[in-house]
Amino acid sequence: MFKTKAIPVKLDPDTTDTLVGEGSSFEGNIKSDASIRIEGEVTGDIECKGDVTIGEKGRVKSNITARNVIVAGTVTGDIQTKSKLSITSTGKLYGNITVASLSVEEGSIFEGSSRMSSQPETASSANQEAAAASQTS
């Protein structure tokens, strides 16, 4: 009788929306607007607008693209961040990285090559570019 319209929900990249728990396994690609935490096993690429956290018991065979990545478990694959990659003392990373900032704690393992990209665009530089573009119009 009454039709309801689905209201699109805008996810906050600062909140963890997806959790692959310990004892769980997932095979396939993951694409998320919110942050992801992995305590289980994931095989497949991960593309995330928020942060990706690999817990101490997490095991990931994946290429990861995210804002920030924290590796406390094991990752086999390449990682690309817009901001920071942190490898904790329990973290193991086997793959190449492209990051703006890198933190590697003593005791961690990193086998691969690293490339530091330029710093991510800040809000003030984005506003300056927008203002310059509007003046030329």
Image (spheres, rainbow, N blue to C red):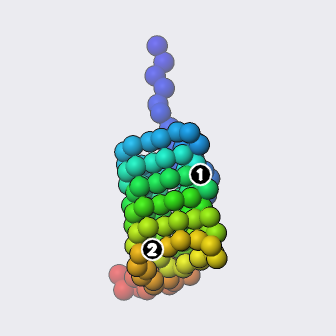
| Residue visible at 42% across and 61% down in the picture | 76
Residue 109, given in percent of the width and then of the height, sits at: 53, 71
Q: Is residue 58 visible?
A: yes
Decide if residue 82 is in sight here: no
Q: Quadrant of residue 116?
A: bottom left
**Figure check: 10 above or below 97:** above
The residue indicated by pointer 1 is: 57
| Residue at x 45% of width, y 48% of height | 42
Q: Nearer the viewer, residue 84 or 55?
A: 55
Three-letter code for the amino acid on which mark 2 is drawn: Glu
Q: Secondary structure at mark 2?
A: strand
Measured along the vertical axis of the image, is residue 82 above or below residue 66? below
Frontmost residue, 13 versus 123: 13
Q: Alpha-carbon neighbours of circle 1 within 10 Å: few (<14), some, or many (≥20)?
A: some
Q: Position of residue 132 (x, y in %)?
A: 43, 86
* Residue, disc 2: 111
Which numbered disc covers residue 107?
A: none
- In this view, the residue in front, 72 or 34, is 72
Estimate the spatial distance between the alpha carbons at disc 2 and disc 1, rounded to whole Å.
Answer: 19 Å
